[in-house]
Image (cartoon, rainbow, N blue to C red):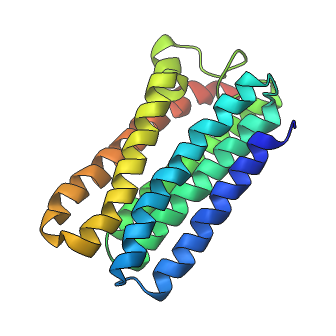
Amino acid sequence: MNQIPNIISIFRTALTIALAIFILKDSENKDLLNFAFWLTWFVIALDGIDGIIARALKITSDFGAFFDIACDRIVELIYISLFVILQWVPFWILVVFLVRGILVDGIRGFANKEGKTAFGEKSMMVSQLGKFLTSSRFMRAFYGAIKALAFATMFIVQAYYPNFLNLEMLLIYLMTLTCIIRGIPVLIEGKRYF
């Protein structure tokens, strides 16, 4: 029972990997792209569901929080890498996510050594703005929603609406900007751990 949220994280990560493999094999199959659209919404929704279950069952843990973040990172990097490989988005988008992820997660690792976590009561964030941007339910939900919208819509645009690619790229850029904005407070406030 205590592992249900972690099993959900593993499941959504495995679904994402399988989806990427199938898309790479047949990236022009409209039925597959349509399926990918719906599966992406499901995968991103599972990210919120695992946290809801952990809180409802009162089985939250530092490891669970770390594992959730790690799976989030894997899922988003698989989607972005897939889109780069297929040349649907520019390479620099992947670079931004990789650099931001490595820096932020590295700093969170240092904070963890001092008993601090990314979110919650033992959050490493001190400022109210930092807490809001990095760990508020609103910002986490907004970021999850923009990722779901950007990732899922990419499949539909590629399959049926190539004329809307510019609009889709706006979603990708908004997602990337949000990723950067949420990482900056960690970089600023994290310098005290060095």
Give how far across and how far down residue 107 sits, in percent.
65, 38
Q: Where 141 sits versus 99, above or below? A: above
Residue 151, image quadrant: bottom left
Give how far across and how far down residue 47 sits, in percent.
59, 43
Q: Is residue 102 visible?
A: no
Residue 166, image quadrant: bottom left
Residue visible at 32% across and 63% down?
154
Q: How many marks?
A: 0
**Dividing the image into 4 quarters, which one contains the C terminus?**
top right
In this view, the residue in front, 105 or 140, is 140
Residue visible at 79% across and 42% down?
4
Residue lying at the far bottom in this picture: please name it: 25
In this view, the residue in front, 45 or 186, is 45
Residue lying at the far right in this picture: please name it: 1
In this view, the residue in front, 118 or 145, is 145
Give how far across and how far down residue 109 sits, in percent.
73, 39
Give how far across and how far down residue 5 sits, in percent.
75, 40
**185 sits left or right of 93 in the view:** right
Residue visible at 43% across and 38% down?
143
Residue lying at the far top in this picture: please name it: 128
Q: Where 180 sits versus 10, above or below? A: above
**Dividing the image into 4 quarters, which one contains the N terminus?**
top right
In this view, the residue in front, 160 or 100, is 160
Q: Where 16 sits versus 134, above or below? A: below
**131 sits left or right of 179 in the view:** right
Q: Is residue 36 visible?
A: yes
Q: Where 134 sits versus 17, above or below? A: above
Residue visible at 34% across and 53% down?
150
**95 sits left or right of 55 in the view:** left
